[in-house]
Image (cartoon, rainbow, N blue to C red):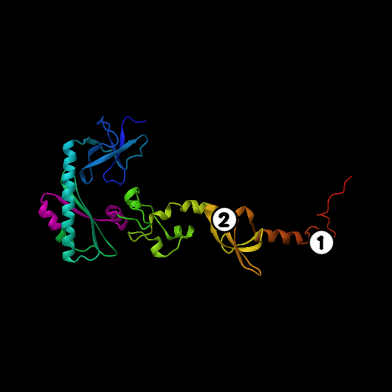
């Protein structure tokens, strides 16, 4: 245990959790807002909870909570939010006027002490153009403020903008509960038997859908206990070839060849691998390697005394 009280704070509704030392602010509780000092200036965030066993800080010690937010602080934050929206609308209009192709302005964030303004943007598969005309607009409105235009990824843009997911759910996963993005690869879709049609596996951000990772590990583990496709197996209906599998049901689809080709489903406990049974058959029919003259009685039952 530690004598410090470490709390988790979020600066965005569905954002990364940051840890701070609240040892000098005794009356904080989950749901409250607090004012802190960060690398991007003074910020206000919401207390999400207390951390009993926090990870070690990346450098030095935990930064301290400056104070619990007051009613005046909350009103100031609302005023700043209105200024951020107005600035973002103006920058988007100017961007369209200047013909910045592919430039997406996601948000404008004014620090709580109004000393720093960060404009987050994305531009796909291109080098960043000269953004000085946009920076000039910000500088004219906030002459004593440090301006920072920061490039972010397409998933971050989708998270900020929100909207309906490709699956039809009212809000995208990234805007609802995902606080960090996991690496997604095409093999995750293959392991789950999902169509590789780009329209089926691509999210609104233009990248592979985050949900491809949700059941990936369960599919990988389940497939370890099932025969692979094109594997020959012995079933209660005869010999056949595996043509498909449903890992979460422990079921395989087998093509039974004969006068009538049939596609049948079998539980994994109902089938046997053909190659293993064939190896046992060949071993049983092979001559004994201990008796070369053919006088082998290895398989005979021992005589009763």
In the rendered structure, the answer to whether residue 128 lies left or right of residue 295 reads left
Q: Is residue 190 magenta?
A: no
The image shows residue 227 at horizontal and vertical percentages of: 58, 58
Q: Secondary structure at mark 1?
A: loop
The image shows residue 167 at horizontal and vertical percentages of: 38, 57
Q: Residue furthest right?
A: 305
- Could you say which is closer to the camera, residue 73 or residue 9? 73
227 is higher (above) or lower (below) than 39: below
The image shows residue 195 at horizontal and vertical percentages of: 45, 63
Q: Is residue 139 magenta?
A: yes
- Could you say which is closer to the camera, residue 49 or residue 245? 245
Q: Which residue is identified by label 2?
A: 251
**Splitting the image into 4 quarters, where does residue 122 fall?**
bottom left
In the rendered structure, the answer to whether residue 173 lies left or right of residue 216 reads left
- Could you say which is closer to the camera, residue 48 or residue 65? 48
> Mark 2: few, some, or many residues within 10 Å (few <14, many ≥20)?
some
Range covered by the magenta-colored residues: 135-162
């Amino acid at each position: 245990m530690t004598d410090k009280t470490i709390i988790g704070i979020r600066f965005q509704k569905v954002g990364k959790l940051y840890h701070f030392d609240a040892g000098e602010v005794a009356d904080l509780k989950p749901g409250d807002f607090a004012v802190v000092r960060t690398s991007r200036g003074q910020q206000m965030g919401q207390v999400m909870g207390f951390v009993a066993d926090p990870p070690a800080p990346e450098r030095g010690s935990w930064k301290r909570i400056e104070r619990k937010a007051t009613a005046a602080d909350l009103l100031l934050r609302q005023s700043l939010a209105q200024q951020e929206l107005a600035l973002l609308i103006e920058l988007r209009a100017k961007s369209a006027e200047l013909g910045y192709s592919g430039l997406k302005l996601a948000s404008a964030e004014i620090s709580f002490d109004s000393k720093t303004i960060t404009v987050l943007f994305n531009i796909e598969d291109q080098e960043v153009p000269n953004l000085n005309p946009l920076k000039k607009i910000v500088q004219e409105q906030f002459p004593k403020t440090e301006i920072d235009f920061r490039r972010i990824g397409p998933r971050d843009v989708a998270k900020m903008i929100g909207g309906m997911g490709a699956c039809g759910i009212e809000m995208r996963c990234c805007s609802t509960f995902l606080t960090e993005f996991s690496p997604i690869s095409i093999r995750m879709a293959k392991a789950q038997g999902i169509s590789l049609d780009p329209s089926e596996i691509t999210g609104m951000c233009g990248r592979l859908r985050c949900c491809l990772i949700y059941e990936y590990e369960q599919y990988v583990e389940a497939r370890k206990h099932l025969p692979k496709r094109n594997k020959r197996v012995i079933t209660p209906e005869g010999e056949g070839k595996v043509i498909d599998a449903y890992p979460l049901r422990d079921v395989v689809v087998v093509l039974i060849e004969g006068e009538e080709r049939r596609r049948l489903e079998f539980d994994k406990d109902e089938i046997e691998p053909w190659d293993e049974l064939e190896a046992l058959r060949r071993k049983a029919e092979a001559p004994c390697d201990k008796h070369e003259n053919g006088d082998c009685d290895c398989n005979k039952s021992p005589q009763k005394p």
